[in-house]
Amino acid sequence: MIEFTNVGLRYGHGPEILRDLNFRIEPGSFHFLTGPSGSGKTSLLRLLLLSLKPSRGNVTMFGRDVGALDHDALLDMRRHIGIVFQEFRLLDHLTTFENVALPLRVRGQPESAYRDNVTELLQWVGLGERMDAHPPLLSGGEKQRAAIARAVIGRPEILLADEPTGNVDPELSHKLVRLFVELNRLGTTIILATHELPLLDSFTYPRMTLTDGRVSFHD
Amino acid sequence: MTDAAIDAPAAIVQPQAQKRAAPIVPERSVAGRTLVLLIAIMTFLSGVTLGGVVLVQKSAIAWSSDVGREVTIQIRPVEGEVMESNIRTAIALAEATPGVARAYVLSIEDSQKLLEPWLGSGLDLSTLDIPRLVIVELSDTVDVDLTMLARDIATINGASLDTHAAWRQQLNTMAGTIVFSGLLVLALIVLATVLAVVFATRGTMASNREIVDVLHFIGASNAFIAGEFQGRFLALGLRGGLIGGLAAVAFFFLVAGAAGSIIPDEASAQLSFFVGRFSLGIDGILGIAAVVPVIAALTAITSRLTVRRFLTQTS
């Protein structure tokens, strides 16, 4: 599903942030991405989200060389990838329902086509009664669940999460990760970046560890 | 998970299905009021300029048409010639010319009225030997043989034919200059509007960077994002255009009313000679009405192109 071959990344003329990345992510897998602050986790996630191009090496996703894709093809591929941010990045002027429905709306679907699906998903993540609330009125956990719902409403094959538990308490962190586990059981490939060691120790999924821009795998 | 419990019983809550989805680009985030005011001013200026051009052009066409329907024979007093006899001959020659409807001499009183603006009123012209004018009304302005008439009139001592061609030429030149100047002003207003919208759009894009980023992350195309901003600017353009267009039409009604009551009669008469009675007519009003969608479309297209350019540069 995802294959990195000798991938390196630098910003402008600066030093390489990521170097010699060689790995393969299988469909339906769950990986934690970890490493100290500044180790390049977010940069790697941006490469996976196709919002950055590698400075060298090849990235293959869904069997296609990402470097050879034009803008429209990249856009189409990005629709197969969901993203959850630590800071939620919900649009404050839209309701929870509208935020979650946004990926379908930008694809030109009418509300009548997605209304039931969005409602069902919001109920599944426990926001059934908060559909009409705007993000400023939601708690941190509610915001993160809304962000997760937005990331998965388009049924992405890959779900990336950048420190999704960074703004919630430990108890809620565990529950949020269990939500990702549930999504993984339904077939979504998950890569979840976190540096919370207690959280990592609670689950037995393999870890991708970034150190000095290089990645290593641990089961 | 107190925090709205993930495993809480799923409440059956109907989404706001009937409510129209909120715009992705929030109304507040666009410098709306300022831009509406600016577009209203630009539309007003465009409307007034266009209306002025229409008034001048309509008056010039009407005046030129009036003047073109008649020619004048001027008979100067010449010693040894009998004026009344020459007048009769001139009328007879004129009426014998193909394309002439009728010819008549202007009375002394009418001639006196024509000279009043220059010589003042209460003048007794009976003591002066002034030229007499024979008005020749044309029934066919195209096929009338004015060359033959001029040749015939030249046989009368002291008589000459004035076809007003020079006046018409000057009038047409003046009207053309005013129309060209008006169009130039319109072009400058359009350019200023485009530049203002470009700056407003750039400002809006900068203040909505977060929204643009989120839309990109969730797979929105540049065309979709540009469309969202275009829709917002189209609404602002329409609102500003309507305000400015209505103000321009109101301006002409007010000026027409004021011209009749405030400006002295003589000045009013001279002004109305050039621009009529400030009455735009249905074509003038339709012209100003057409400015509204043009300005709105211009605003929308400019914002769309600016957004597309911004997105291409940033993606």
Image: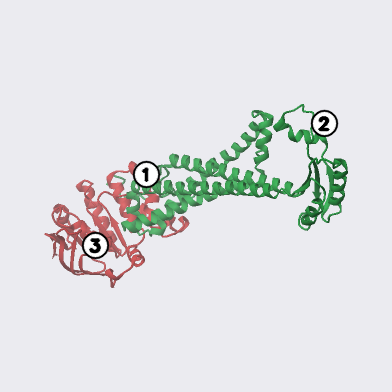
Chain colours: A red, B green
Q: In the displayed structure, would residue B121 be above or below residue B90?
A: above
Residue type highlighted by circle 1: His
Residue type highlighted by circle 2: Ser
Chain letter of disc 1 in the image = A
For this rendering, which residue is in front, B169 or A107?
A: B169
For this rendering, which residue is in front, B69 or A142?
A: B69
Label annotation for residue A134: 1
Q: Residue at x 78, y 33 (%)?
A: B112
The residue pinned by badge 3 equals A47
Chain letter of disc 2 in the image = B
Label annotation for residue B126: 2
What kind of element bears circle 1? loop
What kind of element bears circle 3? helix
Does the CB distance between marks 1 and 3 fall below 8 Å? no
Q: In the displayed structure, would residue A82 be above or below residue B29?
A: below
Q: What is the x, y in percent for residue B192?
A: 45, 46
State the separation of the CA atoms marked 2 and 3: 103 Å
For this rendering, which residue is in front, B238 or B302?
A: B302
